[in-house]
Structures are given as C-alpha cells and as structure tokens.
Image (tube, grey):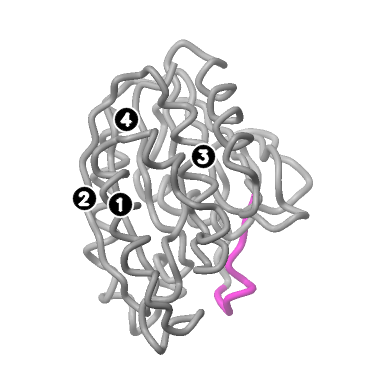
Amino acid sequence: MLVAAAVCPCPPLLVPAVAAGAAPELDDARTACSDALAVLAASRPDRLVVVGPADEGARGVHPAGSAGSFAGFGVDLAVRLGSGPGGERPLPASLAVAAWLLERHDWADAPIEGLGVGETLESARCAETGRQIAGAADRVALLVMGDGSACRTVKAPGYLDERAGAFDAEAARALGAADPAALLALDAELAYELKAAGRACWQVLAGAAEGAGLDGRLLYEDAPYGVGYFVAAWS
C-alpha cells in the first residue's frame, strides 16, 4: 500500500556541480526536495521505489546499488541508488538526479528500487504499473521524478507554446491536491507535444495512490529556463 510520495523535478541542473555558477537559481527547489524526502522518511516505509522518465535502453527496473554518472554533463560525479549489487545498466539521468537527492538526504530508511518509465507509456499502463508497485509491500513510498512542460517561454527547450501554462497549472493543482483522477486525466498526447517528461511518472503515482486517501502539499512551483518544475509531498 502506498503510504507516502514525493514528487521532484529531474533536471541535472538540480545538482550544484552540474549547474556550477547557476546553482543558486535552484536553491529553493533543492530545499523543497529535501522537505519532500523528509515526508517520505517520516512515513516509515518498508520499500522506496524511485520512478523517473527514461529512454528506451534505460527503461525497466534498476536494482538497489545501480550506478549513475553526470559525466555526460561535463562533471566527474558518480552516484548510486541506495546500497546493493546494482545492475549492469547505468541509471537514466532522472534516476541519477534522484540518487543524488537521496545521498544528500542520507537516505537509510528503506530499501530502494528504481524504475525507468517511457515518456510515451499509455495512461492505463502507467496506472496499472502504479497499482503493482503499491501492492508489492505493506508500506510503499514513491519518489517520483519528472518535469512539466518545456514550452513556457521563447527560450525554453521547446520554444513557447501557449498551451503550456494551462497544462502546468493543472498538473501543479493535481499534484498539490493529491488528486489521482486529475493526474490520470492529463492528456498524454498534449504532454508529449509540450515535452512534459513527468506525465507518465505522475500517472504511475496516480495508479499507486488509488484508494490510499493521501493528502498533498505543493512545496514548490516555478518555470526557470521555461520548464515547469514542481515539488509535492503526499502522506
């Protein structure tokens, strides 16, 4: 059963070594992520599952101890997703950011497993994946990584799309209200057009949270660099 969840953005710029001189711009987001992880720890989970968007080669399960790196972003920094033998595949960037957040928090509250999710995964399959995760232990916590639209300004990665503001506003409302139905109602095709990498992962969360009766809080909402970033905690 799902007992708590934290939602965090997953840009590598969240890692100060990657952001370098721009690191202070995301200080508030980092603080909010720490607050959300504290909610997970307080829930005393038996198992923590970290969910994040992944390209085809990195989709699926990443066992505890799996390694990731920010070398592709010009930084000699390696991370591990908890302790364990790991797996052969490197973590996708989203789970590497999650591993960094967990190391920063000194996470030792429950065993960890990672799951890379394709950004185009159908909503129904996302929800079913979430239900399976929630049913795998008595007390499951989720750390859900993912960004909103990347089309909020002309300098955004996807340029300006007038639909992006409304999409992000609804996503933020649903995440802050712990509203699984509203998350499942997010339009997958529109999310893809707006380059909203978090949509599928949020819908995994929605499936896991069905019937759990959790309350939500939106801890952070902004669009630096024209990308929607949200931090929320459910408990």
Q: Are marks 2 and 1 in contact (CB under 8 Å)?
A: yes
Nearer the observer, disc 2 or disc 4? 2
Q: Position of residue 196 (x, y in %)?
A: 49, 62
Pick whichever of labels 4 and 3 is earlier in the sequence.
Answer: 4
Image quadrant holding the N terminus, namely top left
Task: Identify the residue position indicated by label 3 in the image.
Answer: 50
Q: Which residues are magenta?
A: 67-75
Name the mark on residue 191: none
For image coordinates 43% across by 76% down, the residue present is 151
Q: Are marks 1 and 3 in contact (CB under 8 Å)?
A: no
Looking at the rendered structure, the secondary structure element under dot 3 is: strand
Crowding at mark 4 (Cα within 10 Å: few <14, some 14-19, many 20+): some
Name the mark on residue 219: 2
Name the mark on residue 231: 1
Looking at the rendered structure, the secondary structure element under dot 2 is: strand
| The stretch drawn in magenta includes residue 73 | yes
Q: Is residue 145 left or right of residue 62?
A: left
Pick whichever of labels 1 and 3 is earlier in the sequence.
Answer: 3
For image coordinates 24% across by 36% down, the residue present is 216
Amino acid at circle 3: Val
How far is mark 4 from mark 3, CA to CA? 14 Å
Pick whichever of labels 2 and 3 is earlier in the sequence.
Answer: 3
Pick whichever of labels 1 and 4 is earlier in the sequence.
Answer: 4
Crowding at mark 2 (Cα within 10 Å: few <14, some 14-19, many 20+): many
